[in-house]
């Protein structure tokens, strides 16, 4: 068995190197790096036997007294000398590459400590007139450039337009955002943060006001997009939309405009909840430097800064009031640092259950609605 291994040792070594290179590929090393490492490893294999022979000859010529030692001890010393020479030669080769600007040892360490990220990400953009763009972003391999040189874009995208057309576009140089284009630049997809635009022959034609759409967490199949303000949001089946909505409880001349999603009547039947105005609204106040909940409430209570489970920072405030047997609860989530200032308002209108004959209606459960309202709010995406 040992003789079989010695006979085919080089082939076993090459097989081991191929398996090692496959592991490095999975960790994210590029093909040029893998080829260079493979050549280095093969060189080590080819040099191993000559180095061993040189080591034996060196010991016999320069250190003849070692021949008087026991055979096992001599072999140990020969192996030590061999590994010493082998290690020095290996480090010399790595040092030479490092001096030329290629540090393989650091690349291997980084690949192990920082595994390769996902190479593709898919997103859907919702545009004006309910048009959509499905985009798959592909991350290209990094290209090293000298200081002062322009970066080399290597990414690409596959886009599918809602009119049925599809394109594969290569990343190009861009001063801002990330730009992709076909060869003759007749079609350009430009991604800037959560927004996107499509240029056809240098003009925005059909896909305007595009905003990335949050994935459906479950129960929010419908979508609404405002390309002018620059936001998209999801909402449940059956909710009614009022795009002419305005909040009018701050006094004359202080209306706040937006869009409201009110609950379906079926959810309020048999309870003391009013379906007329209970729901969620997205509201916008233009030209505001300090976006906070106080701007949206007449007498805000417990205004505080909160980062929710999605790591979005809000200024949150609430207000409760009642009149003529009606009870109103409001909570505003203003998105900090947005300008225009964007906020999501929860509005729950209920009536005094004591005004009903016993057993005719049930007390509604606010937790049921607050959970859905939270999901709607968290689906909001702003450019």
Image (cartoon, helix red, strand yellow):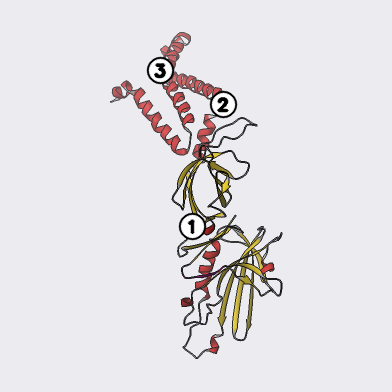
Q: Position of residue 313 (x, y in %)?
A: 62, 59
Q: Nearer the viewer, residue 233 or 352?
A: 233
Q: Which mark is residue 98?
A: 2
Answer with mark 1 or mark 3, whichever residue precedes in sequence.
3
Cα distance in 3D space between marks 2 and 3: 26 Å
Residue mark closest to the camera, 1 vs 3: 1
At numbered mark 1, what does the secondary structure look like: helix, strand or loop? loop
Mark number displayed over residue 215? 1
Circle 3 SS class: helix
Q: Give the magenta part as a residue range.
A: 238-242
Which of the pair 141/95 is nearer the observer?
141
Q: Nearer the viewer, residue 337 or 171?
A: 171
Between 281 and 23, the residue placed more toward the observer is 281
Label 1 and label 3: CA atoms lie apart by 60 Å
Q: Residue at x 48, y 33 (%)?
A: 30
Point out the frontmost of discs 2 and 3. Answer: 2
- Magenta run includes residue 190: no
Cβ–Cβ under 8 Å for marks 1 and 3 = no
- Give how far across and how far down residue 115 sits, in percent: 49, 41
Number of the label disc, if any, that sits on residue 49:
3
**Lower position in the chain sequence, tag 2 or tag 3:** 3
Q: Nearer the viewer, mark 2 or mark 1?
A: 1
Is residue 231 shown left or right of residue 56?
right
């Amino acid at each position: 068995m040992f003789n079989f291994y010695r006979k085919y040792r080089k082939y076993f070594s090459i097989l081991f190197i191929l398996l090692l290179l496959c592991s490095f590929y999975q960790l994210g090393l590029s093909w040029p790096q893998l080829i260079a490492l493979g050549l280095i490893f093969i060189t080590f294999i080819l040099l191993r036997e000559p180095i061993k022979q040189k080591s034996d000859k060196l010991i016999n010529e320069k250190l003849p007294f070692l021949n008087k030692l026991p055979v096992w001890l001599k072999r140990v010393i020969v192996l030590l000398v061999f590994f010493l020479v082998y290690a020095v030669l290996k480090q010399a080769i790595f040092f030479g590459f490092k001096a030329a600007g290629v540090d393989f040892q650091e690349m291997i360490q980084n690949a192990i400590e920082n595994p390769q990220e996902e190479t593709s990400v898919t997103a859907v953009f919702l545009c004006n007139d309910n048009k959509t763009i499905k985009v798959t972003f592909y991350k290209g391999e990094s290209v090293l450039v000298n200081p002062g040189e322009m970066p080399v874009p290597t990414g690409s995208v596959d886009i599918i337009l809602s009119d049925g057309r599809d394109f594969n576009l290569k990343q190009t140089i861009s001063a801002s955002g990330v730009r992709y284009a076909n060869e003759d630049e007749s079609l350009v997809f430009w991604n800037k943060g959560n927004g996107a635009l499509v240029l056809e022959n240098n003009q925005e034609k059909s896909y305007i006001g595009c905003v990335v759409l949050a994935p459906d967490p479950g129960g929010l199949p419908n979508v609404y997009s405002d390309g002018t303000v620059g936001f998209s949001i999801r909402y449940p089946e059956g909710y009614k939309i009022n795009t002419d909505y305005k909040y009018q409880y701050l006094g004359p001349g202080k209306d706040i405009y937006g869009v409201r999603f009110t609950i379906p009547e079926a959810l309020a039947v048999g309870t003391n909840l009013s379906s007329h105005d209970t729901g969620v609204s997205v509201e916008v106040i233009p030209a505001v430097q300090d976006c906070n909940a106080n701007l949206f409430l007449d007498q805000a209570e417990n205004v505080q800064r909160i980062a929710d489970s999605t790591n979005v920072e809000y200024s949150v405030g609430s207000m409760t009031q009642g009149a003529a047997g009606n009870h109103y609860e409001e909570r505003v989530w203003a998105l900090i640092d947005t300008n225009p200032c964007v906020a999501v308002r929860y509005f729950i209108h209920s009536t005094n259950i004591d005004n009903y004959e016993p057993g005719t209606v049930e007390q509604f459960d606010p937790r049921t609605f607050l959970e859905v309202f939270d999901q709607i709010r968290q689906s909001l995406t702003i450019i």
